[in-house]
Amino acid sequence: MAYVRRACAFLNQRFEAMETAAHGRSRDLANEDELYFGVSQRMVTARLRPAIEGAQWSGIVSRIGVRALETGLVDAVLCVQQSPDDRFTPLPVLARTPEQVLAARVNKPTLSPNLEVLEQLPGSGIRRLLAIGVGCQVQALRAVQDTLPLEQLYVLGLPCVDNVSRAGLQTFLESASDSPATVVHYEFMQDFRIHFRHSDGREETVPFFGLDTPKLKNVFAPSCLSCFDYVNGGADLVVGYMGASFGRQWLTVRNPRGQELLDLVETELDLAPVSSRGDRRAAVQQGIDAYDKAIKLPRWLAELVGFIVQRVGPQGLEYGRFSIDSHFTRNALWVRRHHPEKAEDHIPGFAKAIVARYRLPSL
Ligand SMILES: Cc1cc2nc3c(=O)[nH]c(=O)nc-3n(C[C@H](O)[C@H](O)[C@H](O)COP(=O)(O)OP(=O)(O)OC[C@H]3O[C@@H](n4cnc5c(N)ncnc54)[C@H](O)[C@@H]3O)c2cc1C
């Protein structure tokens, strides 16, 4: 709490300083891949073999956490379990055993106060820590890193957008799923559909373009509507999916510590190079205008648009750029409308360069 004013990603954005301290340099804005995906020494796609049952994707993140404990690389793993009463309420913990790490598998798609558990460090005997977290948590962690009683800190990041409070999640589930009470897992996938898994194992898919935009516009947390750290620029290694082809995970190694984390599981991965296909730009521009007017398409039309986009639309890294462009333009507009006095300082240079490629609606 004492460090919150300095640490909070939304009071104080300092990407260049954070990246330089963590990786030895900040992202190269002249390099199109770094402009979008941050400092990188290696990018691959992968699947864990065998996959971990019940993980969000194949479970690469949980497996790295388990191996980090088993090999003695760290004494504890900061991860997010679920509250005993509710699958979607996050419970950050300092896991000391593989079982505790595995109990944290699968996303809790709600805002999680991860840094709270750092207060348990003094006197815990934990000197080496692996912290798993999304961008805002990692920015705050990096800001206080030097004040922590640790000898080693490894950071395993997840990309993240459009997080919500628990109440906001309920609104989203009720507007998007045919059975909100039984959803146990969902993901916005690279086929432009949301995949919901229900407690009886049924899979329901809904096209992105059929979402109830008028209802959902106010669901996302203000912190997420003003975030430009989708790709988790401060983490040593980032494990997501959006830069990979359908069904695979996407890994960005930012520095040698990130490679050390990947080394823990690399022999268990089915690896492939990253690829890219299509041209996102027209789709992003159309999406900016449709979102601003809060247009809701009828289901048949949403299915048709989804069908076409899935076949000819952006894939691999181009899908990642599509998602980044769509979110950065929306968020830049939100910040400029709601906090005009802060916009200039708050929106980082890399995001301004991306947003400037599009025509935004008037303020
Ligand atoms: C809120 C959220 C939004 C995401 N959005 C995107 C996205 O837009 N694009 C993309 O490419 N990837 C996104 N991801 C990452 C992606 O969904 C997977 O989590 C990632 O690829 C790892 O999959 P896995 O099977 O290896 O994870 P698992 O082995 O299932 O492990 C999941 C890990 O997530 C951690 N976790 C769960 N909930 C939270 C939380 N609320 N805050 C912090 N950590 C949490 C747990 O500690 C656990 O270690 C998001 C993740 C989260 C948590």
Image (cartoon, grey):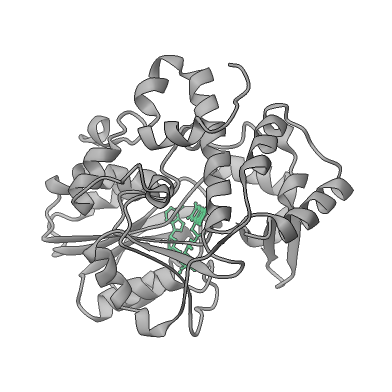
Q: Position of residue 238 (x, y in %)?
A: 38, 60
From the top left corner, tell me how far across and down residue 117 is, in percent.
28, 52
Question: Quick check: 225 left or right of 19?
Answer: right
Which residue is nearer to you in this view: 138 or 41? 41
Specify the farthest residue to the right: 300
- Residue at x-position 24% and y-position 43%: 18
Q: From the top left corner, tell me how far across and down residue 109 is, in percent.
A: 53, 52
Kindly identify the residue that appears in the image at 25 percent across and 71 percent down: 260
x 40%, y 45%: residue: 35
- The mark tally for this picture is 0
Question: Is 133 positioned to the left or the right of 215 in the image?
Answer: left
Please state if 188 lies on the left or on the right of 294 as rendered: left
> Does any portion of residue 344 appear in the rendered image?
yes
Location of the N terminus (image quadrant): top left
Residue 178 visible: no
Question: Is residue 134 placed above or below 79 in the rendered structure?
Answer: above
Position of the C terminus, as image quadrant, is top right
> Closer to the camera, 62 or 135?
135
Give the farthest residue toward the front: 30
